[in-house]
Image: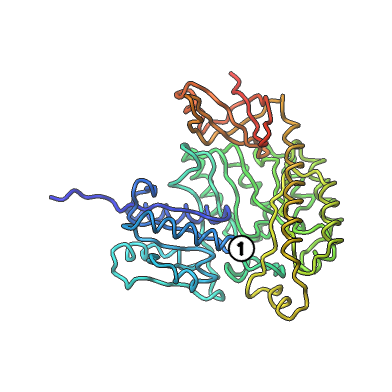
Amino acid sequence: MKEYRKKRVAGVTLGCKLNYAETSSILGDLCKQGWSLSSIEEGADLIVIHTCAVTKQAEQKCRQKIRGIIRKNPASRIVVIGCYSQFNPEALAAIKGIDAILGSNDKFEIKLYNDILLGSVSLPVVNVSPACMLEEIYPGYSLQTATGTERTRAFLKIQDGCNYGCSYCVIPLIRGKSRSIPALQIVEQAHVLASSGYREIVLTGVNIGDYHADGQTLCDLLRMLEEVNVSRIRISSIEPDIVDSELISLVAGSQKIVPHLHIPLQSGSDGILRAMRRRYDTAHYRSKILQSVDQIAECAIGADVMVGYPGETEEDYRQMYRFIEELPLAYLHVFSCSVRPGTLLARQTAARERTPVESGDIARRYREMVELGRRHEARFKARYTGTECLVLFEHAKLAGEGIQQCSGYTRNYLRVMVECADSELLQTLSGNELPVRIDSLDDDLNLKGRVLS
């Protein structure tokens, strides 16, 4: 008799934390249907690739990753899901070897994955619901997968979609209008994660500050989640106009909500912010940053910054540079503007209402802003050399010549590495939150320390 073997599925996630949450949810649902989790290296029957389409560069990386996976796994079924699938399925359909392309809603049709594997549907499958139908809200949370070798961080989806309508942003066209998961359902999921051994829960969504469900706001939800038996609750990216005194006070007074906020800026020029249709100006942004670092002990604040927005003059850029230079930021995520089809910005540039920035100027501004971000990061991290911090360890790996490394994050999102020749001792670090003395900051801005007994 032929030995029964479970169907094996592997997931590859590109893009944001929300994608990670949804990939985990899909894989978890497949496991409930009798599948087993695998890795690409182990040989999966089906590989699910979750894509991003926020920029042209993100799409290019997705195509490269997909082609590489197809080339190395000729015997596997390949399913491409997510934002790129929703936004431009035609481009993906041109890649030979993809067996299915599933859009923002369609990727949650769990039965379909089995049909694709068995070939009981005509391949390739292209299921992409129109954007106007993106009204469902699917929970996304990690029950079957973990970050690292132990259950440390889980990404918990609380919201999807966005109503803001920023001129450059394609996400509302891909994920639809803002909608939120009921608070009691989120709290129930968080309790399951805690009982499964996770130590940190990261709240994810497209615009989580816009959370509203059954009369409850994000702050209401956070107060409910503080009762969950986890060490840490982390807020992912949150819009500046929603960072108010209530939220800042709540984070400042919490033992579980960590002192780390990622607050997108996009531009430090008020003229460009108006053109982007952002809901704040530089004075508002500065006041919220200063209020946060003043009231929240050890607060780390990161920001997204975009260079080369059409119509951005050299003076606009210099205003932004000077503005960011003076802010107490811990790090920057720097992007070059990508004009996405279907957005207001695309229509404006097509009508020549906004003038594209020269590519050479964009490249220079990008390099300068990255270097400014590096200086912010170095200055913030240097404050912690010689101090003791709690580190939640995640990754253990061989560093060479018998030395192994394990890394993890402090509450305010500083990545710290420790080295040890005792592999058994090092492996016990993963999944544990332990006191570490930070000894040094190297030229690559890596913090290194040693575990305190």
Say which of 84 and 246 sits in front.
Answer: 84
Task: Name the quadrant containing residue 118.
Answer: bottom left
Q: Position of residue 366 (x, y in %)?
A: 73, 55
Query: Is 394 drawn above or below residue 291 in the view shown?
Result: above
Taking the view exactly as shown, the residue that stands out farthest to the top is: 453
Left or right for 419, reference 33: right
* Secondary structure of residue under mark 1: loop
Q: Amino acid at mark 1?
A: Val
Say which of 104 and 380 sits in front.
Answer: 380
Taking the view exactly as shown, the residue that stands out farthest to the front is: 360
Q: Position of residue 314 (x, y in %)?
A: 84, 61
Q: How many marks?
A: 1
Determine crowd level at label 1: few under 14, some 14-19, many 20+ residues with C-alpha closer than 10 A.
Answer: many
Q: Residue at x 81, y 54 (%)?
A: 285
Say which of 82 and 182 sits in front.
Answer: 82
Taking the view exactly as shown, the residue that stands out farthest to the left is: 1
What colour scheme does the image use?
Answer: rainbow
Q: Which residue corresponds to mark 1?
A: 54
Q: Position of residue 376 (x, y in %)?
A: 76, 42
Left or right for 251, reference 420: right
Quarter of the picture containing the C terminus is top right
Q: Residue at x 85, y 46 (%)?
A: 326
Left or right for 309, reference 406: right
Left or right for 114, reference 2: right
Q: Position of residue 344 (x, y in %)?
A: 70, 75
